Image: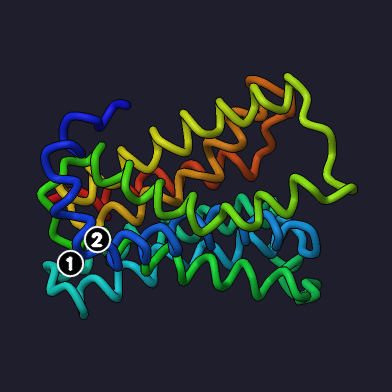
Amino acid sequence: MLARAELREHGRECLRRPLPYLLLGFCGMFVCGALFYKAGRTTQAINMGLIYATSPILITLASTWLLDERRLSALQWLGVLLSLWGVLHVVTAGHWMRITDIVWVEGDFWVMLCAVSWAAYALLLRHVATALGDMGRLALINFAGSLLLLPFAVSEWFDPVTPELTWQALALVVVAALIPGIGSYLIYGWAQRVLGAARVSVTLYLGPLWNALMAWLILGEQLGPHHWVGALMTLPGIYLATRR
């Protein structure tokens, strides 16, 4: 509905070459949207955080090699590494030796696939030319992702072990669709047009900090020293990595 006008004007032109939108829907919606939850069934949060933290590094390296974006300066690379260090400090709760105790399981493979897939999504988003604006492009990507997920959604609907859909669950689905599903993807795509894939990818390291802040505000969880130390490394790192 929000993109009706521009889809009416440019939609047919874009649908003549649907492959880019199907690839974007597969990487950004199918893999990163569905398989990440599948991974969470068999692996731990620390594994997921450590593996997914590689995605911005993959995007930064690939964007300079494949998209000929301006290479990051030494100071910007320092920012990338400082942000990564801060995120890992939060993920390990300040106990770095926990990394040696990690047991790798099937779910870690799915997280690794998600990290690579998000890097591919970011690069495709930067590379694919379109006459659509940010909202129209996202609408087509969401439509493609929905088509790919539809058979699995139908099979889950008729699966007897699927939990009953309550009004509370439906409300949470709507919130997830509007805020991260539309808002986050829309802002990320717009920011890539302005700043480029490499510099925007570093902002993904804000995720664990936002998680901790929202858990404190909404769930009443306590912020630990590792959150503050991680923030003191991540925030200056993002500033260094994204400054001109």
Secondary structure beneath dot 2 equals helix
Q: Residue furthest bottom?
A: 65
Instruction: Please give the name of the residue rendered at 29% of the width and 26% of the height, measured from the top-left corner.
Output: 2
- Looking at the picture, how far across and down is residue 149, in whole percent? 56, 55
Residue 219 location, quadrant: top right
- Looking at the picture, how far across and down is residue 105, in whole percent? 78, 75
Indicate left or right for 88 with 197 as reference: right
- Looking at the picture, how far across and down is residue 152, in whole percent? 65, 57
Q: Nearer the viewer, residue 192 or 162?
A: 162
According to the image, label 1 marks what residue?
Answer: 73
- From mark 1 to mark 2, how far is it between C-alphas? 5 Å
User: In the drawing, what numbered circle is on residue 215?
Assistant: none
Secondary structure beneath dot 1 equals loop
Q: Is residue 235 above or below residue 23?
A: above
**Numbered circles on residues, count:** 2
Q: Nearer the viewer, residue 82 or 216?
A: 216
- Looking at the picture, how far across and down is residue 234, in whole percent? 44, 48
Residue 236 location, quadrant: top left
Indicate left or right for 148 with 10 as reference: right
According to the image, label 2 marks what residue?
Answer: 76
